[in-house]
Amino acid sequence: MLSTHIPSTRNHSWRGHSPPSAPSRLSQTHPRRIIITKSIQEQDQPKKTRAQASESRAGKIKHEVLAKEGRTKLNVLPDRDFYSFPRFVTHVDDGFISTLTNLYRERLRPEWEILDLMSSWVSHLPEEVRYKRVVGHGLNAQELARNPRLEYFIVKDLNQEQRLEFSDCSFDAVVCTVSVQYLQQPEKVFAEVFRILKPGGVFIISFSNRMFYEKAISSWRAGTPYSRVQLVVQYFQCIEGFTQPEIIRKLPSSSSPESRNAPFNWFSKFFDLFAGGSDPFYAVLSYKNFRSLSE
């Protein structure tokens, strides 16, 4: 409320002119003062601390990473149709799978609850570790039903609907193996993963150079191994609250200096030319808010 106080007319000579109208009693009490008062509702409203403001922004999309053309696919048919037929094959080689399983062994704890996002009939989790709960998500129910690690699973096309049917802070870890290249709305999916992760939970994305070319998004198809890693880094960075992404690479041994000078290396290169070579391993991971204190 804005109150304006006008000075008193006492001791003034108006010399034939009529004095101004008499001021209000409130105005006479406090001459030459302007008082601005807040409403009761404004006074009672508590101010947000910096920590509370930061928490309220957590999980929000700060900016879009992909342009419209970068989200396009060569095969525009619904993904549910493309994946309707089960494929009981592994899409990467044994070396990649071994590296991924070792990463899971190092970063995932037995008491954790884990979501295997965009999964299939195998999760690549270490066989000797029994987790508290492993839930699966994918597009083919037959594949998911064959996965022995899953307690249960959901079937959902994340390119059509990004909302996941889980409560906030449901999982200690979310993993996604060789599938991130198919997401047309990665910003929304990463925000949703942030929502369902517990504080300190980890999101692990792994991929190689293989893909269903017609189903990968344009930004991925046109990219290089370096640019694809950076693209996933940007997916994490566009969500408020993820820690600085960590990058893990393991390239084929033939590219190391030691192997280039090894005897019979020419034979290995000749064989790789026909066998297609081993799959490079890339992983990008980030934590929700903070790393757990015991790490």
Image (tube, grey):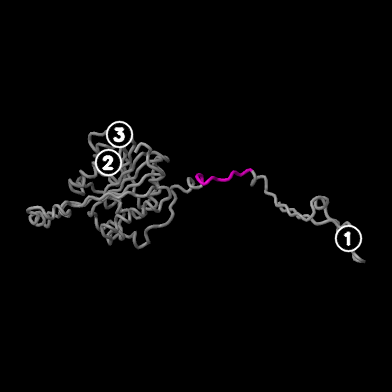
Disc 1 residue type? His
Alpha carbon distance from label 2 to label 3: 11 Å
Q: Which residue in the protein does label 2 denote?
A: 104
Residue 114, picture quadrant: top left
Give the residue number, with chain letter if any, for mark 1.
Answer: 12
Q: Residue at x 34, y 36 (%)?
A: 113
- Amino acid at the residue labelled 2: Tyr
Residue 59 percent across, percent down from the top left:
43, 48
Mark 1 lies on a secondary structure that is loop
Q: Is disc 2 surrounded by few (<14), some (14 to 19) or many (20+) residues within 10 Å?
A: some
- Nearest the viewer among 239 and 187 is 239
Q: Is residue 149 left or right of residue 240?
A: left
Give the image location of residue 62, x and y in percent.
44, 54
**Pointers 1 and 3 in contact (CB under 8 A)?**
no
Residue at position x 78%, y 56% in the image: 32
Q: What secondary structure is marked by label 3?
A: loop
Q: Secondary structure at mark 2?
A: helix
Provide the residue span drawn in magenta.
Answer: 44-52
Give residue 186's position: percent from left, percent from top: 36, 53
Please indicate whether residue 1 sits to the left or right of residue 9 in the image.
left
